Image (spheres, rainbow, N blue to C red):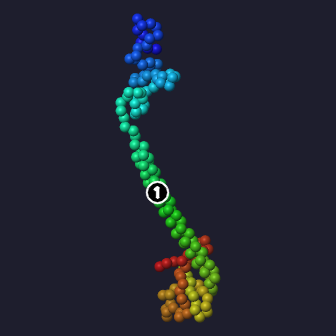
Amino acid sequence: MGVRFPHAGPHIVSMNKKPNSAKGVNSYDSTTTGTLIPFFNRNVSEYPTEAGGIKFDLVPVTKQKDLMINHARMYAQQEYDRIMQLVEVLEKQAQDIRRRLEITDAVHAAEYQFQLVMGNCYWLVWDTRKEKTLLVLTGPTGWSTGKPIDYEYVAKVKYMGDHTWMEINE
């Protein structure tokens, strides 16, 4: 248990030496709680572990919390910005699909007198004299004598492989 003094009797333990059942360097058995805690290592804690130890400053918890929340916000903001960029891409794709559906509906409502070929481009025109939409093969600059007076060109469209129509912007 401890160092015994030969003249002091069997139960006296030296006050300079603390019990150390684990025989660890810089460690001792602690009995501060009333029970034996073997191998209490003082090196584990950055603060003094016994009364009369050296003075120490407290960790600035508020500052640490501020740093942690700032880091968390920074990383969360980066992730949020990345997601919002993806949302913008998806919104653009949704608008493009909506426009394709509008053009597809307009082409299916138009009159034409020829066989359609996938991958080819055609023109949607409004015939002011007949007051209806037509699908024609010739664009506004493709006429040798100039475009018909009654035609108002609406859009150049392409027949896609999925049977939809896409507006071609030149």
Q: Which residue reaches farthest front?
A: 52
Task: Report the residue at 40% width, 16% height from top.
Answer: 15
SS at badge 1: helix
Residue 164 place in picture, x, y as percent: 60, 74
What is the tally of numbered marks visible in this picture? 1
Residue 40 place in picture, x, y as percent: 45, 26
Location of mark 1 (residue): 77
Query: Which residue is more in the foreground, 144 or 34?
Result: 34
Task: Report the residue at 52% width, 22% height from top.
Answer: 35
Q: Compared to 160, does 11 lie above or below? A: above
Report the side of 165 relative to 29 (left or right).
right
Report the side of 29 relative to 122 (left or right).
left
Report the side of 146 relative to 101 (left or right).
left
Within 10 Å of the Cα at label 1, are there few (<14), some (14-19), or many (20+) other Cα atoms?
Answer: few
Residue 98 place in picture, x, y as percent: 58, 73
Instruction: Write down the quadrant of residue 23 in the picture.
Output: top left
Q: Amino acid at mark 1?
A: Gln
Residue 63 place in picture, x, y as percent: 40, 46
Query: Which residue is more in the foreground, 35 or 80?
Result: 35
Task: Report the residue at 46% width, 14% height from top.
Answer: 1
Res 137 seen here = no
Q: Compared to 124, does 78 lie above or below? A: above
Report the side of 116 relative to 35 (left or right).
right
Instruction: Write down the quadrant of residue 109 in the picture.
Output: bottom right
Task: Report the residue at 41% width, 27% height from top.
Answer: 50
Res 35 seen here = yes
Q: Compared to 32, does 101 lie above or below? A: below
